[in-house]
Amino acid sequence: MTRLIRSITSALAIAALIAALIAALIAAPVAAGEQRPVHGQFTGFGVAADQRCGPDALTLGFVITGVTSHLGRLTGSGTNCTELTLGTQAVPIWHGIVTLEAADGSTLSASYEGHQGAPEAGVATFLHNDTILGGTGRFEGATGEWTISGLIDLTNLTVSGTVSGWLDY
């Protein structure tokens, strides 16, 4: 009887070990490609930028500060191309690039494209889709996609908006 109990105990221990190994193998790929939700907000203002968009387009520069999940407090800067009629008409936004620095000094880089609505009383809505290209520090090798939306006040060159999407790092 004692030998039977030992055999059953050994079999249960081996079964538990196999179950733990299978669970670890199943969970490993999920942890490596986890799409973490990102939400946040920011404010900023326009700054001078070297023109890189060609003679019939305008390069806009900006700096921002804000708070988002996973980055905490952040600062950032970037540029994008748009049409010269942005003060009076709806216009596309293209060749956007931005670098964000998290509270711990890690960075994220993204490219984006989108559009700006026609201004009303000097204020226009905007929306663009960002693709995370990578980063430094804890964001090295990061990927992700965000939607950025907000308002541009063309009378004082300020911007405010929200961030929603995912980040994998």
Image (cartoon, helix red, strand yellow):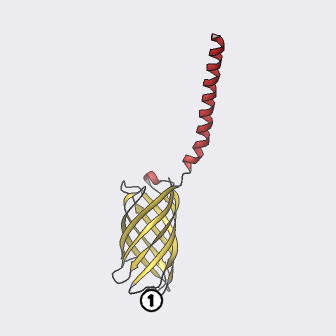
Is the residue 149 above or below the residue 140 in the image? below
Q: Nearer the viewer, residue 48 or 119?
A: 119
Number of numbered labels in the structure image: 1
Residue drawn at 51 percent across, 78 percent down: 115
Find numbered disc 1 in the image and state the secondary structure of the residue it sits on: loop
> Is residue 51 visible from the viewing direction of this image?
no
Percent position of residue 22, x then y:
63, 36
Is the residue 18 above or below the residue 57 in the image? above
Q: Amino acid at mark 1?
A: Thr
Percent position of residue 168, x then y:
52, 54
Mark 1 highlights which residue? Answer: 88
Quadrant housing residue 67: bottom left
Quadrant housing residue 66: bottom left
Pick out the residue farthest to the left. Answer: 156
Is the residue 50 above or below the residue 68 in the image? below
Residue drawn at 63 percent across, 31 percent down: 18
As drawn, is 61 to the left or to the right of 143?
A: left
Percent position of residue 120, x then y:
42, 86
> Is residue 22 visible from the viewing direction of this image?
yes
Percent position of residue 16, x then y:
60, 29
Q: Nearer the viewer, residue 5 or 68?
A: 5
Is the residue 87 above or below the residue 45 in the image? below
Q: Nearer the viewer, residue 137 or 6?
A: 6
From the image, which quarter does the N terminus lie in? top right
As drawn, is 123 to the left or to the right of 18?
A: left
Mark 1, Cα crowd under 10 Å, few <14 / some 14-19 / many 20+, is few
Residue drawn at 36 percent across, 71 percent down: 44
